[in-house]
Amino acid sequence: MTGVGSAIERARRDRRALDEEHLAALAGLAARVRELAAAVVLTDVEIDELAAVGAQVEALTARLGAARREAPPVARYGGRGRLRHVTNPVTGPGNPFAPPVEVEFTEAGARAVVTLGHVYEGPPTFVHGGVAAMVLDQVLGMAAGSKGRPGVTASLELKYRRPTPVGVPLTIEAEVTGSSGRRSHVEGRILNPEGLPTVEATALFITPQR
Amino acid sequence: MTGVGSAIERARRDRRALDEEHLAALAGLAARVRELAAAVVLTDVEIDELAAVGAQVEALTARLGAARREAPPVARYGGRGRLRHVTNPVTGPGNPFAPPVEVEFTEAGARAVVTLGHVYEGPPTFVHGGVAAMVLDQVLGMAAGSKGRPGVTASLELKYRRPTPVGVPLTIEAEVTGSSGRRSHVEGRILNPEGLPTVEATALFITPQR
């Protein structure tokens, strides 16, 4: 993927960064919209009320659109000083779709604890298999990045061992198992509250060429 | 995964179904919340306005919570007569998190065209690799299901060939390549607007035992 690295770097530089106060306000709004989405999938109000709330939501969307960026913002957060994507769909505090997963870095790689609610449900009472894949891709990628090799996913292999339950704390962990040049090999898994693996992942990340 | 199939069946039966009119109203509200989330990641309004909109959102969440289900609803939709999960995070019209991907069934399996916006962005201007995995898991699983073998994901392998761009129509296609007993092998891919594969997937789905 020659040239992808420089394109990503350029796009990141072009995005106006948020200061701490602005990021906190955006994260607060995103959290409220996240709660709203969670309420949508479980609401049992009447049809007229669904329509009335929808009309109010439309008006709020218009207010947010009064001033609009070309592309989502970046900011320094998460304790590493590096400009990060505030609206990443897995970890971004500014993205209502992100749980968001809060990743901590470990000696071996990365680790997170997250509860995924009904918004992320596939088969009844279980987390959607694709959502499990999405979360693992992000945490494994951050493990690779923590060793100085931020990269894009080249391959991702997932083995589904048992269902992943919704609404309970899940642990996600990842370890860098090897690296050479621009390539990082990473392994990880989702553990249910009993500590048993529900989904196991192995991935290869490649640092794009500049 | 003995017993998982019967647990899923039971949970599905227990969920009160929505009639057509109620589903349309819920889908309308989910569409408005989807637009609101898209506005959040691109808004450039002042801090006070972010807070004011957030307070309004909180009030709407309370209104939806005035009557609440124990679990998300099911309904007959999508032209197959079967009860479906209205809030599936990839295809569910009632889930603000879902793009939603509208899947059509083909002779070989399944196909969809979808545009993924900045809410699903990973590296700047590109779809998050985990979101690509999530969408492929769903479409490949539906291809398996269309051949009479609805199942849960047992394994999913993804090869990332080139970046998947945000904001342009992507084609997702999947074909069942083999099946025996409760096992279905499926292949699929995401194609960019030039028709080139961005992510290739192979998966094994297993119909759970009752």
Image: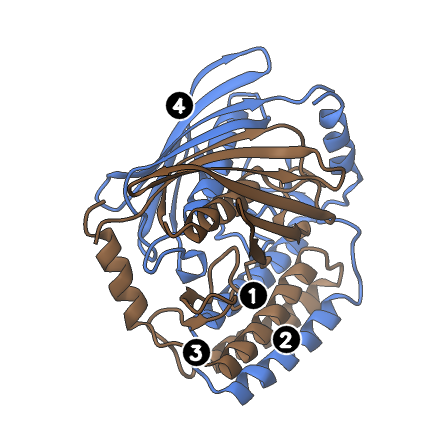
Chain colours: A brown, B blue
Residue on which the image places disc 2: B57
Q: Circle 2 — which element?
A: helix
Pick whichever of labels 2 and 1 is earlier in the sequence.
Answer: 1
- Judge if badges 1 and 3 mark residues of a common chain: no
Relative to A144, is A46 on the left or the right? right
What amino acid does circle 3 point to?
Leu
Task: Say which label, 4 or 2, has the lower sequence index.
Answer: 2
Residue B58: where, in percent of width, then height?
68, 75
Q: Return the x and y of residue A52 as percentages of the image width and height.
A: 65, 73
The label nearer to you, 4 versus 2, is: 2
- Whichever of callouts 4 and 1 sits on the residue coming sooner in the sequence is 1
Read off the chain for label 4: B
Q: What kind of element bears circle 3?
A: loop
Residue at the front extreme of this rendering: A107
Query: The disc numbered 2 marks a residue on which chain?
Result: B
Residue at which label 4 appears: B108
Mark 2 touches mark 3? (CB < 8 Å): no
Element class at badge 4? loop
- Dot 3 falls on which chain? A
Picture residue at 22% right of the left edge, 49% below the top? A209
Residue B46 against residue A76 in the figure, above or below: below
